[in-house]
Amino acid sequence: MPLIDTHAHIHLEAFDADRPAVLERAAALGVARLINIGYDLPSSEASVALADAHPMVFATVGIQPHYALTTIPAQLDRIAALLAHPRVVALGEIGLDYYHNRAPQAAQQELFRNQIDIARQHGMPIVIHARDAQADTVRMLVEAAVGVPTVMHAFSGDWQYAADCLALGAYISLAGPVTFPRAVELHEVAQRVPLERLLVETDCPYLTPHPFRGKRNEPARVRLVAERIAALRGVSYEDLVAALWANAQRVFPKLAAADPLFDV
Ligand code: NI
């Protein structure tokens, strides 16, 4: 069974020198699909262009909270229009970032809510970026996103926060930090999340797994994340990967619709 990296940013300059080789290395390790994630309008357009150019790439489109003060309605109209593209599988990454706080929190919340509404209108899932904003993220998802399939991207937090997200129906997507030897809170989350709610991602070029920390991350390394989770849960790699594939298909229905590889 192939593996899917549900959150990558290979449109970035960090991959300009060797993007085709990066995709080949991923495929050679069984990472047959990746979702390239937009976080503003240019990166969303770039994600769609990559998805058009490479059969193994899918895309999301959305605007991160950092741009809450500078986003104009025409940009949200363009995001909404891009959702109709057959290889755009979700709206994201969107959310709240009180760690960087590059925009006032009220503006972040307004942009987040507007995009949740767009996703709901278009019947699309959402990919959530949440940093130092657990309480407001959960509150806003309860208020605005009931019934909208939701992925907590690069989940970071303890089991209680994970349980709160699971109670909303959200999927928990784990990235490189779960491989760090001292990440005991994430190890517990990896062990306790129901198998049918788990996803894996790289968030490359960031969040490089152990033992490559400090180097550029790339989609092939999502395999290290899956191997660590399988070991933590005491299940076989093959069984875990089969579940991850089915989960991605369930939460991102357009993946399967646009891709015969998912027809299993
Ligand atoms: Ni990201």
Image: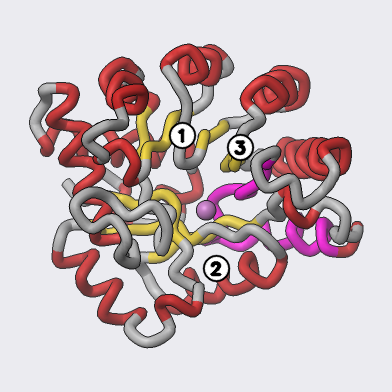
Q: Which residue is mark 1?
A: 155
**Cα distance between the residues tagged 1 and 2:** 22 Å
Q: Is residue 13 left or right of residue 6?
A: right
Q: Is any part of residue 121 visible from this angle?
A: no
Q: Is residue 212 left or right of residue 92?
A: left
Residue 95 included in the magenta stretch of the image:
yes
**Cα distance between the residues tagged 1 and 3:** 8 Å
Q: Is residue 163 left or right of residue 140?
A: left
Q: Quadrant of the C terminus?
A: top left
Q: Residue 186, percent across and down?
A: 35, 27
Per the rendering, the mark at residue 130 is: 3
The span picked out in magenta is: 75-97
Q: Amino acid at mark 2?
A: Ser
Per the rendering, the mark at residue 47 is: 2
Label 3 secondary element:
strand
Q: Amino acid at mark 3?
A: Ala
In-front residue for pair 179/72: 179
Q: Residue 1, percent across and down?
A: 16, 46
Note whether ligand 1 is within 8 Å of mark 1.
Answer: no
In-front residue for pair 125/67: 67
Q: Choose mark 1 or mark 2, whichever is in front.
A: 1
Q: Residue 188, percent across and down?
A: 30, 19
Q: Amino acid at mark 1?
A: Phe
Is residue 223 placed above or below 46 in the rendered structure?
Answer: above
